[in-house]
């Protein structure tokens, strides 16, 4: 269901923004606005230190709250699925530097500087149905991504010219062009499109795609038991898991709790053991609660507003610039982020080698008079400055919509707001490109690839605003192919520079994806995206 912003909220928002103007302090460093509450900081970004937690206990069921219902367990279907790695594991795994390392696969090596890659498999790894995870199983799964254009991995997989099983435990990939990032494709978060999440070919043959979407069969630490949509998903310990002595837990239970307040209350009152936080509100409250453990790391990516660049008025750069210049980040931080907002003026963080002073200077500063002028010029040329803004119905997104409506109104842009539950919003609005402008959380992410490629490349899997620039495409293609760190950095700097000049999206803050857990939860191993490896987790109770 979607709904529009009620008139009383629009009035309150306008009054609130006027009040904020008298209270906001000048921004210092990367945080905007006056600070209240706990300090926003990186804490346990990649999980727990397994060596310092003592002897793990076996048994128990971990209860986890998701921020949305799972769409599918089929790796070729675009969706967010926090339970996927519990069922599948991953052939490779990113380390804390974003570098892929062996996991279910024991090796990944190139013999000719990036054109030919050989993956070595562990003979002890079997699917939970007893069949081997061998070279042919990998080929069967990768071929599905090549054949299915809607797969989030299709754009990566089509770089493969050929595949062959050298022997049962060795797969050889020959690429159409050299690629230094090819191993990463087998270690990515599930919703980014991970070639390393492998479905049992036997299950595929017997159940079909519709069957494995609902009843997956993988080689991970847990096996599928039952799933009542919009209620709970139950997974059970895999007795034949490839890592001896693991997992420690008897089972996992995932509950979809899309309402932000309900989800956070569920961890505070003890109904669940872990919540996957999507927003700043959960993170900052978790950091302020001494009875909870928080896992968060600021990375690349950001919270931003998508522009539909093939639909008026945002096919006109003047209107994109007007939106960016109309948003007072000091007021935003004070009203929406408790003064603890890490500003974003590009996809890559200021502390990375992919950001430059030139790209930061290219990003428009807050200037309401300039915004008014841009809107007036657009209207004078016959344009219509009344637009729809679509977002989710999470309380903090409603508050942001109020804020945005008042800010853009001051520049001459009339915003009509529509709200959706998260699952509907992701599929029916953003992925369907049914919007003029739409809010999005696109970070943090563990490395530049594939997030920047997906967002900015023509036809990229998350390029829902239909942004296109041939120079950006070329720079992204260079970043994918090169094995030279200096050339990689130069390519991503060019991406940041050009996309900032084009105003591909409207950044305002870095992202705040987090994991929040009870102190009894041990053995957390995660990515910045919240994707979790469950084999080592245990409960100290």
Image (cartoon, rainbow, N blue to C red):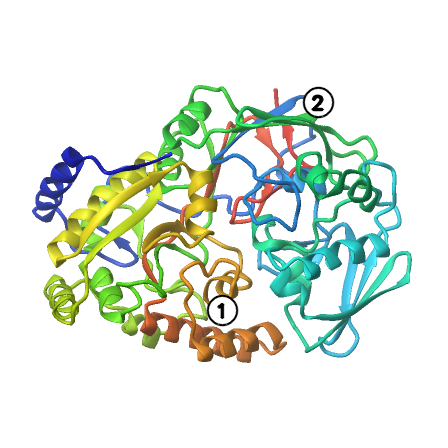
**Mark 1 or 2, closer to the camera:** 1
Nearer to the camera, 473 or 196: 473
Query: Which of the image's four quarters has the C terminus?
Result: top right
Q: Can you identify the residue that label 2 sits on?
A: 59
Q: Residues within 10 Å of mark 1 (few under 14, many from 20)?
A: many
Residue 338 visible in rendering: no
Query: Which of the image's four quarters has the N terminus?
Result: top left
x, y percent for residue 322: 20, 64
Residue 377 visible in rendering: yes
x, y percent for residue 280: 36, 42
What residue is rendered at 89% in x and 50% in y? 123
x, y percent for residue 225: 71, 26
Q: Residues within 10 Å of mark 2 (few under 14, many from 20)?
A: some
Indicate left or right for 505 with 164 as reference.
Answer: left
Dot 2 lies on which element?
A: loop
Q: What label does residue 457 carry, if any?
A: 1
Q: Earlier in the sequence, mark 1 or mark 2?
A: 2
What residue is rendered at 40% in x and 34% in y? 286
Position of 293 relative to 148 (above/below): above
Distance between the alpha carbons at the discs numbered 1 and 2:
46 Å
Nearer to the camera, 189 or 343: 189
Dot 1 lies on which element?
A: loop
x, y percent for residue 235: 68, 28
Nearer to the camera, 248 or 282: 282
Q: Would you identify the image quadrant in which residue 305 lies?
A: bottom left
């Amino acid at each position: 269901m979607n709904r529009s912003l009620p008139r009383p909220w629009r009035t309150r928002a306008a009054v609130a923004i006027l009040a904020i103007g008298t209270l906001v302090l000048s921004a210092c460093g990367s945080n905007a606005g006056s600070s209240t509450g706990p300090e926003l900081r990186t804490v346990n970004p990649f999980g727990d230190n397994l060596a310092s937690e003592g002897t793990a206990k076996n048994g128990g069921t971990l209860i986890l709250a998701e921020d949305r219902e799972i769409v599918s367990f089929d790796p070729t279907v675009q969706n967010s699925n926090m339970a996927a790695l519990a069922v599948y594991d991953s052939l490779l795994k990113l380390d804390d530097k974003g570098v892929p390392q062996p996991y279910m696969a024991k090796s990944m090596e190139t013999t000719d500087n990036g054109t030919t890659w050989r993956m070595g498999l562990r003979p002890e790894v079997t699917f939970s149905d007893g069949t081997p995870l061998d070279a042919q199983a990998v080929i069967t799964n990768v071929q599905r991504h090549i054949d299915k254009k809607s797969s989030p991995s299709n754009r990566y997989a089509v770089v493969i010219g050929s595949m062959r099983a050298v022997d049962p435990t060795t797969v050889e990939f020959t690429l159409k062009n050299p690629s230094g990032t090819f191993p990463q494709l087998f270690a990515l978060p599930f919703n980014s499109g991970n070639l390393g999440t492998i479905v049992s070919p036997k299950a595929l043959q017997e159940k079909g795609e519709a069957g494995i979407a609902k009843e997956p069969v993988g080689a991970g630490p847990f096996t599928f038991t039952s799933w009542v949509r919009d209620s709970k998903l139950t997974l059970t310990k895999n007795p034949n898991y490839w890592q001896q002595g693991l997992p420690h837990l008897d089972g996992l239970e995932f509950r979809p709790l899309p309402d932000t307040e309900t989800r956070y209350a569920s961890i505070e009152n003890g109904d669940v053991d872990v919540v996957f936080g999507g927003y700043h509100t959960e993170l900052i409250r978790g950091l302020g609660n001494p009875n909870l453990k928080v896992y968060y790391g600021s990375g690349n990516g950001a919270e931003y507003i998508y522009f539909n660049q093939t639909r008026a008025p945002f096919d006109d750069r003047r209107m994109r610039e007007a939106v960016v210049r109309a948003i007072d980040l000091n007021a935003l931080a004070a009203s929406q982020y408790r003064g603890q907002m890490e500003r974003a003026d590009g996809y890559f963080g200021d502390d990375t080698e992919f950001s430059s002073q030139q790209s930061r200077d290219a990003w428009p500063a807050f200037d309401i008079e300039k915004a008014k002028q841009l809107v007036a010029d657009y209207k004078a040329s016959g344009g219509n400055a009344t637009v729809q803004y679509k977002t989710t119905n999470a309380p903090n997104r409603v508050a942001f919509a109020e804020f945005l409506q008042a800010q853009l109104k001051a520049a001459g842009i009339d915003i009509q707001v529509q709200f959706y539950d998260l699952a509907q919003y992701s599929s029916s609005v953003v992925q369907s490109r049914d919007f003029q402008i739409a809010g999005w959380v696109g970070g943090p992410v563990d490395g530049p690839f594939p997030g920047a490629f997906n967002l900015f490349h023509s036809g990229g899997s998350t390029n829902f605003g239909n942004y296109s620039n041939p120079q950006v495409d070329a720079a992204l293609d260079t970043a994918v192919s090169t094995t030279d760190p200096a050339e990689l950095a130069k390519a991503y700097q060019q991406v940041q520079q050009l996309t900032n000049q084009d105003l591909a999206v409207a950044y305002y803050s870095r992202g705040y994806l987090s994991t929040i857990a009870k102190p009894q939860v041990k053995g957390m191993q995660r990515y910045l995206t919240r994707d979790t490896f469950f084999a080592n987790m245990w409960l100290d109770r």
